[in-house]
Amino acid sequence: MTAPATAAPDHPRFAVGVLAFCGVVVAVMQTIVVPLLPHVPALTGATPAAASWLVTVTLLTGAVFTPVLGRVGDMYGKRRVLVASLGVLVVGSVLCAVSSHIGVLIAGRALQGAAIAVVPLGISILRDELPPERVLSAVALMSSTLGIGAAVGLPVAALVIENFDWHTMFWVSGAIGVLDIVLVLRCVPESPLRSRGRFDAIGALGLSAALVCLLLAVTQGGDWGWTSARTLGLLAVAVVVAPLWGAYELRRPTPMVDLRVSARPAVLLTNVAALLIGFAFYANSLVTAQMVQEPKATGYGLGASLVVSGLCLLPGGLAMVALSPVSARISAGRGPKTSLALAAGIIAVGYVVRYFTSHSLWLIVAGATVVAAGTAIAYSALPALVMSGVPVGETGAANGLNTLMRSIGQAFCSATVAAVLANMTFLAGGRTAPTLQAYQLVFLIAAGAALLALAVTLCLPGGRADTGTVEGNRRSRNRTRAMPIQEGA
């Protein structure tokens, strides 16, 4: 049968706003439990190790489901899959809201993590539906919601925890998820673009197995021991499964991940840069709140409250909102490669500022905001680079893979930061705390990751924005709308 000629909404700005709101909500869900973690053992009777899974499980499910749901969206309808992802978020929120049992909470958080696929699906819808001249700015905003949500989530969660029952934040997130679904159904059209073929279930399972083994080893290696049988065993399984999965994918006519496209320098180097940017950005979120909460007895800590420490990241979130259109203009005029290179340099400068200004709250906030500003530009440029290197019919899967690379970078960052802060400690005020040098080392490592991202970006082919991202998409869009879609072909 023929693809339905679904028109863009009469007010496409509503679609952009709705999708961006969905992205922020989903990103907030990833960080909403971070202020709660120290209290989870007392509230649920769980061990600290079990409580840490409230964060780890969202990383795992997000990493697994983001590329898979991106591919499903390319094949069966992006809006349909986006609504289903939001439905999963609502179910996960309700599970967390009605129970204090750690097993139920972990299951609910796993469902919330799967909903991160909303962001690459939203980017793909915007590419398909908006007029060409609006694509870059809209995609820039949508991509930045990952950072905006992370910056907003911490202070909001801290305010809720200090003033209400902690289950309240999950009831609120569930209600907002329902609102998101209603808004998407009313304001966002279903894209008529489809990729052909059957869903590669074996490829999805192989990718999931490799990712779970790798990320479990990375996130839990510090607790289990980096040379323990569990850690080394998981790494070994990942090393064995990954090339077998790759060989299988290369033989498939419609693979889960088109490795030939992914191996193109423009796509491969963009994904490597995404991993490094994800690493560099996440260090900012991980250490800022903890650092300002350290007691004054450490000599550098400010003894700030939970709410104040969360608010330190809020200016960075506002900067990301303001700078996403700026990044789009740079990408349109100079090319997304220039935007990404500029962003990596700004992030590195931000960490240099943080290295030398670790005793003043306002200077800490300033340094964190500079890092967030660079991240906003980077997150806006990355999908533009991806879209210029992949066919229109693979946008969802390609953006899902790019988002996955950011998640892997964040996982490696989390493990690195935990190792540094745990191994460089001293006694202060009767308790063990990380040294100032530990935090400064984290800043240097993150700056190094940003500089590596800059080097990788400079190796990308091309300079100015690829007009194929605009005009080529228009032509491909028109061709695909006229193309018959064979269900199950």
Image (cartoon, rainbow, N blue to C red):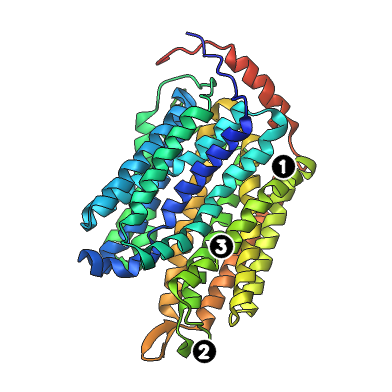
Identify residue type, mark 3: Leu
Identify residue type, mark 2: Gly
Identify residue type, mark 1: Pro
Give percent across and percent down for residue 206: 36, 38
Circle 3 — which element? helix
Compared with 96, 303 (above or below) is: below
Mark on residue 299?
2
Between the C-alphas of marks 1 and 2, the distance is 48 Å
Q: Kindly report which numbered mark, 1 or 3, lies closer to the viewer in this rendering.
A: 3
Would residue 332 appear left or right of 29 to someone viewing this image?
A: right
Q: Are marks 1 and 2 in contact (CB under 8 Å)?
A: no
Image quarter (top left, top right, bottom left or bottom right) of the C terminus = top left
Inspect this view and state whether residue 377 appears. no
Q: Are marks 1 and 3 in contact (CB under 8 Å)?
A: no
Near-viewer residue (88 or 18): 18
Q: Kindly report which numbered mark, 2 or 3, lies closer to the viewer in this rendering.
A: 3
Disc 1: which residue: 461
Q: Residue furthest top?
A: 1
